[in-house]
Image: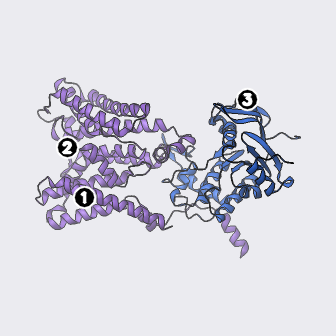
Chain colours: A purple, B blue
Amino acid sequence: MARRAQAEQVVVTPRRPELWRRTLAARELGVLIALVVVLSTFSVLNRNFLTVDTFGDILTQAAELGIAAVGVTFLMIAGEFDLSVGSNFAVAGILLALLTTNLGWSPFLAIPLVLGVATAIGVLNGVITLGTRIPSFITTLGTMMFWRGIALAVTGGWPIHVLGSSRMLDLLGGMAVYQTVRISALWWLLVTVLFWFLLVKTPYGNWTFATGGKPEAARALGVPVGRVKLTNFALAGLLAGFAGFTQFGRMGSMSPVWGDGLPMETIAAAVIGGTSLMGGAGTILGTVLGAITMASIRVGLIMVGAPSYWYTAFLGAVIVVAVILNVRLGEMMAWRR
Amino acid sequence: MAEVALIEARGITKSFGKVKALEKVNFHVGYQEIVGLVGDNGAGKSTLIKILTGVYPPEEGEIFFEGRRVYFSSPKDARALGIETVYQDLALIEQMSIARNFFLGSEPVKWVGFLPLLDSWRMTSTTEEALRGLGITTLRSTEEEVRVLSGGERQAIAIGRTLHFGAKLLILDEPTSALSIVETQKVLGYIQEAKRRGLSVILISHNLYHVYPVADRIVVLDHGRKIADLRKEETTIDEIVNMIAYGGIRV
């Protein structure tokens, strides 16, 4: 008997916690509960809510927010903020509209160039923040106003319209792929999968968590903390610009005032989804569910005939409840050991 | 000294402004030796360690590692030779899993086409093996977050990590300062296990009662000078306590 016990100790098998434990410990649990509550409420209030058509509308709304929110989540996990995503969104859309309509550029040239500009806006946020060591909240508050002002100044405050449809607009966000589900939902899916992969399955993702979790420790172990943050600023910029493209594609025009609420909405989606404001923790799936929850509220309120003003009030309540839920569930998991 | 020491520092002097933090200190650690470095606050323990790990250069004095003269321009140089420090606040990230912490900065990668993937299986199995090797069997899974672990378990992970990555000299800064009695005993056990595996250890502590049972030799610093360097057999706890308290010279 004794010898057997000894033999068993030597055998090393990586164990995973049981499924129920992993489910309960998942950071996404809070947002999942919130989403189910929101969907059930609206389904009871309006029979037509739970249909493919409605879901398509929700996904379209969620995708434009969600693409930017994925980038913001990545950056928040690394411990930084980007409030300039909404202005970057507008600048990218306007610039693409100007280049392709007014200047007649080929989309093949204009799209990569504008994505480069959006990335550069992100890099600039990073360079200012890391170079001067001021909080990114302040840096990007400044660049938020700066780039919004540039978008307004360049357009004189007027939207840019594209007359007639174009293949480019269709591919960016206009085209329906299945009933009311638009192509932007597919772009979002692609972005989500790529960034989920990067965060969870690569060393770079590990560095991102460590950079936001405890930068001094990460640095001591050889993680290039500054470079990780800078890269994540760049990615947040890139995705904000791309999100602008999808709205431009759907609307066939671009206004310099669009994307106004995006900074707070992206942070809200991330936080509802369990991402920590302090950095070091968060998931891409949580943010995706957060964006879907927010879009469901918007679409649901319209369907039950509530004035659209209620959206903001309702959303505010959901954010607070979801975060309380996340924190409480997290604490429960810590005791349970 | 008949044999070559693993690390030897000769005549180390360092001052900060007018304060002499260290004055002509000689210090060495032999192979597979545990040296307790004790002294009151401000005695120069941290400064000495920072010089041995490349955080500051000494103003005067020389450092030899495995018999060769070395110059450290940064902590990286010291780490490259196998000198690893586990600080009081530990380089562990609370919200990350044990396995992810264990491999942070040296993640094993499995290439799938052009994609560098984390080799999760290797991460979890190696971490478990390493921790079990130290005698830790209380962990449920290496996928648990570090924040749910006790102080002793955290020490074990930090020590296990340095062992795994091939350190030769392990420096522990107050490893037992925040631990319960039972946990302290466990951590002291891990330190002895590290020695059995061929490492040398410098154990810095205020608490002589933690250092004394495991140390082979005890070095006492006082106001930047070395006032004692004694093999454990040659001294008693009370004698050293007196030296720390009164800065007394051994009669």
Calculate the distance from the C-alpha at mark 1 to the C-alpha at mark 2: 34 Å
Secondary structure at badge 1 equals: helix
x and y percentages locating residue B249 in the rendered image: 82, 45
Mark 2 lies on residue: A175
Q: Quadrant of the N terminus of chain A?
A: bottom right
Asked whether disc 1 touches disc 2, contact meaning CB atoms under 8 Å apart, the reply is no
Residue drawn where x is 71% and y is 36% of the image: B22
Which of the two discs, 1 and 2, labels the residue nearer the N terminus? Answer: 2
Which dot, 1 or 3, sits closer to the camera? 3
Which of the pair B15/A218 is nearer the observer?
B15
**Residue A317, which numbered label?**
1
x and y percentages locating residue A77 in the rendered image: 41, 47
Which dot, 1 or 2, sits closer to the camera? 1
- Vertical relation: B40 (above or below) A329: above
| Residue sitting at the far front | B246
**Residue B60, which numbered label?**
3
x and y percentages locating residue B215 in the rendered image: 77, 53
Calculate the distance from the C-alpha at mark 1 to the C-alpha at mark 3: 64 Å
Q: Is residue B30 visible?
A: no
Secondary structure at badge 2 equals: loop
| Residue sitting at the far top | A103
* Residues beneath discs 3 and 2 located on the same chain: no
Residue A15: which quarter of the image? bottom right
Which of the pair B4/A110 is nearer the observer?
B4
- Vertical relation: B63 (above or below) B210: above
User: Disc 3 marks which amino acid?
Assistant: Glu
